[in-house]
Image (cartoon, rainbow, N blue to C red):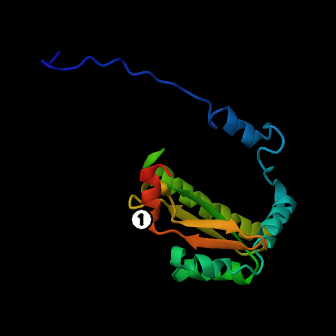
Amino acid sequence: MFAGACRVSAPRVVTEPVGGGALTRAALDGSAPRGWFAPRPRGAEQWTSHAESVRDGFAGAGWLDALRPALQLSGAAHERMARVAAGNGIVVTTGQQPGLFGGPGYTWLKAMSALALADRLERELGIPVAPVFWAASARRGAGGTPARVSRGRDGRERVRTVRARDVAAAWHCGA
């Protein structure tokens, strides 16, 4: 042992079944208590019904115009999202703070999974589908995406951008 070195305990390996903890497994296999999770669509008919119900919630709401500054779309991504907005399509969305909980490989996997799901849904359902992957940047830290979505009394969705300094102030003050 080196002079001044600390004793360190031996590494301990803990294994879990693939699929995460008990709550994750219950969500995935449908055994969670009723009402905890929306049932996962199975088959083209259920996916079509689910897509229609999601799409109907945003009909005529101008959601793309509200999100355009945050999305900063260009090229093929712009064309695909325009097809979704014009053709009553849907958006598949996910995100990750890069490097957090699984490292950069996990972030890449989630982004590619969103793209693969969007491609398959578009092919199988015959409706436009676009993937959106958000990355919580270090600039924003744990505050996440600087936007808030709310539903007004009239039922319309509203997107309000939040200034980064307001997010930082709320985060650091414990608000």
27 is higher (above) or lower (below) than 76: above
Q: Tag 1: Cα neighbours inside 10 Å, few (<14), some, or many (≥20)?
A: few
Expressed as whole percent of the image width and height from the top left, the position of residue 137 reads 43, 60
Q: Which residue is mark 1?
A: 165
Q: Residue furthest left?
A: 3
105 is higher (above) or lower (below) than 158: above
Identify the image quadrant of residue 151. Answer: bottom right
Identify the image quadrant of residue 87. Answer: bottom right
Q: Is residue 133 left or right of residue 123?
A: left
Residue drawn where x is 61% and y is 78% of the image: 66
Q: Name the residue type under label 1.
A: Arg
Residue drawn where x is 56% and y is 60% of the image: 112
Task: Decide if residue 124 is in sight here.
Answer: yes
Residue drawn where x is 44% and y is 48% of the image: 103
Expressed as whole percent of the image width and height from the top left, the position of residue 29 reads 76, 40
Nearest to the observer: residue 150 or residue 130: 150
Expressed as whole percent of the image width and height from the top left, the position of residue 56 reads 81, 72
